[in-house]
Amino acid sequence: MSAARTSRRVAIVAKKRPDPRGLVAAYLLVFGLIAAFAGIAFGDFDGKTPQIVDSAVAASALLPAAKDATATTPAPAEIQSLPLPRRPPKPSGFRSLPADDLAALVETTADGLRLPRVAPSGWMPWIAHSRRFDPAGPPARLGLLVINVGLNEAAMRRAIEDLPPEVSLAFLPGTPDLPRRLAQARAFGHESYLMLPMDDLAVAERGVRPIEATADGPENLRRLRATLARGEGYVGLVISPPGRAAQSETVMRPLVMEIAERGLPLIEVNPAPGATPIQRLAEELGVGYARSTDVLDYKLAGDGVAGNLDRLGAWVSETAPGRAPRHAFGVMQPDDEAITAIAAWYKGQEGQTALSFVPIIGHFECRNACMTRLRAQPAQLRP
């Protein structure tokens, strides 16, 4: 190996040195080229302003025309700007709590989950994050809840941006970038909820384990907390449709107890007559509860979403001596046809005084133990 290296060094040393006169000539050639290119770059040969064209084909077409002084020069290509995203209206309708109170509404668990909780000051998430409404309006109340938001991004964007702010939105917990979507909904004036997956194995594909009648109590409790940790700033939970787990008081009791202790309410979409197990547990354990039997976009309903909402509004507006004012809210899916119909219906309601169109917070029942919890922070009793 050492001999080979010695031979290589000898060969290199033995090479003939280049002729100095050749180097000088090369340097002169380089300097000449540099001077020529400088003249081309900085010289003003014909006094014409260079034109920008939008393709290489147009640029090459100009070359033959350079010999013809009368050739027309193509106009510069137009520059078109991209459409800007729709800007949300000025935030309104929500409480402005001090930063300390807002921070106290979230608990970080030992395993890193950020969960809603009742603040030491008594503020409950379902009141702190709800949209306010005017209690002095007509006592008959009508509301609208859009469920399963987040399955389709385009429909989700339309629901957030095009629906009236009084419409409440219930997001799937597996929605991509859910915290940002919840913040966008609030910026457009919507109060938000989370769908609680029940007996739905399809949601497991989106990283969420559903509450199941066949799972044990601690496992269902873990799944509930995993759902709650998906985002922040929502009002409560929505259960739809009611499956085996929702019909079992044994399965639901520890879950409703956890929901109560964290200051959240429950919405149930259930057309069945009579009280449900969840409704009984909510009253017993002090949970705000709302229920709808009116699915407005049900295909067999006949008159479409707007017609069904009109019919529900007519029922709410009926009065009778000695009867308390009625309130009800309808439920729909976020599809284009329904969103367009609701936006048009809302514009047609301007100036009417027969009923109040309010967010879902205006439709909850809060009795006994629930009212005791609310009175812990008197400011919560003001709508």
Image (cartoon, grey):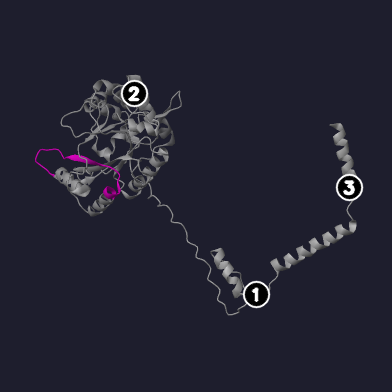
Residue ID for mark 3: 15
Nearest to the eye among marks 1 and 3: give it: 3
Residue to which mark 1 is pinned:
47
Does 268 sit left or right of 53 as displayed? left
Whether residue 362 is visible here, answered yes or no, is yes
Secondary element at image label 3: loop
Q: Position of residue 60 (x, y in %)?
A: 58, 68
- Asked if disc 2 and disc 1 are in contact, CB closer than 8 Å, the reply is no
Labelled disc at residue 220: 2
Q: Nearer the viewer, residue 177 or 374?
A: 177
Q: Quadrant of residue 199?
A: top left
Q: Is residue 242 left or right of residue 35?
A: left
> Does the stretch in magenta take in 326?
yes
From the top left corner, tell me how far across and down residue 178 is, in percent.
40, 38
Pointer 3 and pointer 2: residues touching (CB < 8 Å)? Answer: no
Q: Which residues are magenta?
A: 318-339
The crowd level at tag 2 (other Cα within 10 Å; few <14, some 14-19, many 20+) is many
| Residue type, label 2 | Asn
Front in this rendered view, residue 265 or 338? 338
Instruction: Please say if 333 is above or below 265.
Output: below
In the rendered view of the protein, which quadrant contains the C terminus?
Answer: top left
Query: Relative to the observer, which residue lies in front, 38 or 139?
Result: 38
The answer to whether residue 135 is visible is no
Q: Amino acid at mark 3?
A: Lys
Up/down of 156 relative to 269, above or below: below
Dot 1 amino acid type: Gly
